[in-house]
């Protein structure tokens, strides 16, 4: 009868499974750090895109609010020339009370946008249909410009402001 003994390890080998070498660890750290650096490099671009999207959303909300008010206003209420009254909005496009914004010691951090509606002195030549040049300008349509400036200055002057500081939207109002 032959007795078998469990297999003995050679004295120079370890019974543990082999691990990662220093070179393999360093290579994996280099690849991971390259990925992290790339992600950190994209972070400012992502923040800028997020800021632009929030600004576009707030300006769109302001434009919709003012255009809706102009559509529901009576024709006689639309009687000013040049820029109308200045309106104030926060960073979400929600209107602020003018008394709170212009008061002494008011919280200027909440003011983010200033808006006004420009009504031309002479009606813009809005001709319908567009392919008939002999037709006179419409008297029951009025084209207006909604001007929005991203500023916290309640005394913002739309007339002297450069065009790149003011975003303009056109609205056509019909006489009911």
Image (cartoon, rainbow, N blue to C red):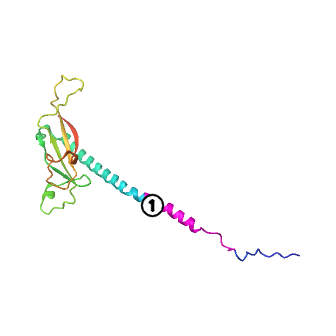
Is residue 14 found left or right of 24 in the rendered image? right
Quadrant occupied by the C terminus: top left
Q: Where is 139 relative to 164, above or below?
A: above
Magenta highlight: main SS? helix
Nearest to the observer: residue 150 or residue 63: 150
> Residue at the spot x=18%, y=46% of the render?
162
Reply above or below: 159 against 26: above
Residue 88 in the magenta stretch? The answer is: no
Residue 161: x and y in percent read 16, 48
Which element is circle 1 on? helix
- Identify the residue at horizontal 75%, vertical 75% (top origin): 8
Q: Which residue is mark 1?
A: 36
Q: Position of residue 175 (x, y in %)?
A: 17, 34
Q: Start and end of the magenta stretch?
A: 13-38
Residue 132 quadrant: top left
Picture coordinates of residue 89, whole percent (x, y): 21, 53
**114 to 19, vertically: above or below:** above
Nearest the eye: 126 or 10: 10
Residue at the outermost right position: 1
Q: Residues within 10 Å of mark 1 (few under 14, many from 20)?
A: few
Image check: 168 left or right of 13? left
Q: Position of residue 121 (x, y in %)?
A: 11, 37
Residue at the image point whose x is 50% and y is 62% from the top: 30
Quadrant for the N terminus in the image? bottom right
């Amino acid at each position: 009868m032959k007795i078998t003994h469990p297999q003995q390890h050679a004295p120079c080998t370890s019974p543990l499974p082999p691990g990662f070498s220093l070179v393999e660890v360093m290579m994996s750290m280099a690849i991971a750090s390259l990925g992290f650096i790339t992600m950190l490099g994209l972070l400012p671009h992502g923040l800028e895109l997020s800021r632009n999207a929030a600004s576009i959303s707030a300006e769109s909300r302001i434009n919709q609010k003012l255009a809706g008010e102009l559509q529901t206003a009576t024709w006689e209420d639309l009687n000013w020339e040049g820029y109308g009254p200045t309106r104030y909005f926060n960073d979400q496009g929600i209107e602020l009370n003018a008394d709170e914004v212009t008061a002494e010691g008011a919280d200027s951090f909440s003011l983010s946008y200033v808006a006004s509606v420009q009504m031309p002195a002479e009606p813009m030549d809005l001709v319908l249909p567009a392919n008939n040049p002999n037709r006179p300008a419409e008297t029951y349509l009025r084209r207006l410009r909604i001007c929005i400036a991203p500023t916290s200055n309640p005394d913002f002057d739309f007339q002297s402001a450069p065009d790149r500081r003011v975003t303009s939207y056109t609205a056509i109002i019909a006489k009911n």
